[in-house]
Amino acid sequence: MFNRQTSLLIPSKALNRWLNRLLAFTLILIVSWGNFCSSATALLRQHHETPGVLRYHAQDSLKDRDGNTWQVLLFPDNTQNQKNTYYLRLVGFPGMNSFNHPQSLEILTSQGKILTATDAYAQSSPASNVGQYDLTSIISQLPNKQSLKLSVPLQNNRELALKIPQAVLTEWQLLTQEIE
């Protein structure tokens, strides 16, 4: 004979198993979401360079395609003359990468335009893992709403390639507006 209670339990167990699997999959997806999103928290900072002189800079920590972390700083320098000079400083972990000075920094926009910034440390660098580039002549040409790719040769025939997300570009635009 056909037992009515047994037939109702079978679909219920299967449904519970299916719901448990769906819940587990959803939790795994939510927990691992941070691994799939590129993290970039740009920050506009201010500091007192000397008493009465307040300086601003944008600072971020980004990973290259090899997973190495780089500090990316954009800052104005008006010590040379009245007009602000904008520098982009790239700092890698000591001993991991060394810049091949003097080499220009290439900036590729999402529209395919290539911009070039000269090596500010062409003559001497404070450390081999530090590169600094003069962005003054091209900073106004940087896009507002897209991302960029930075590319510069490193020693041992290697290349640093960093993607600069839109959030970081927004901070750079904010910095230039704040200074001007």
Image (cartoon, grey):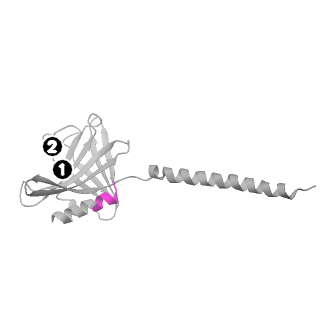
Looking at the rendered image, the quarter that the N terminus falls into is bottom right
Asked if the residue under mark 2 is in contact with the one under mark 1, i.e. CB atoms within 8 Å, the reply is yes
| Side of 166 relative to 7 (left or right) | left
Give SS at disc 2: loop
Looking at the rendered image, the quarter that the C terminus falls into is bottom left
User: Residue furthest toward the left?
Assistant: 81
Magenta span of residues? 164-170
Which amino acid type is shown beneath numbered disc 1? Thr
The residue carrying mark 1 is 118
Residue at image coords 27%, 56%: 43
**Res 10 → quadrant:** bottom right
Question: Is 101 above or below relative to 3?
Answer: above
Q: Nearer the viewer, residue 45 or 112?
A: 45
Question: Is 84 above or below relative to 128?
Answer: below
Question: Is 122 above or below relative to 47?
Answer: above
Residue at image coords 21%, 37%: 128
| Side of 11 relative to 124 (left or right) | right
**Res 15 → quadrant:** bottom right
| Side of 112 relative to 118 (left or right) | right
**Residue 11 forms part of the magenta stretch:** no
Q: Position of residue 178 (x, y in %)?
A: 19, 64
Give SS at disc 1: strand
Q: Main secondary structure of the magenta part?
A: helix
Can the viewer see residue 139? yes
The residue carrying mark 2 is 122
Packing grade of label 2 (10 A; few <14, some 14-19, many >=20) is some
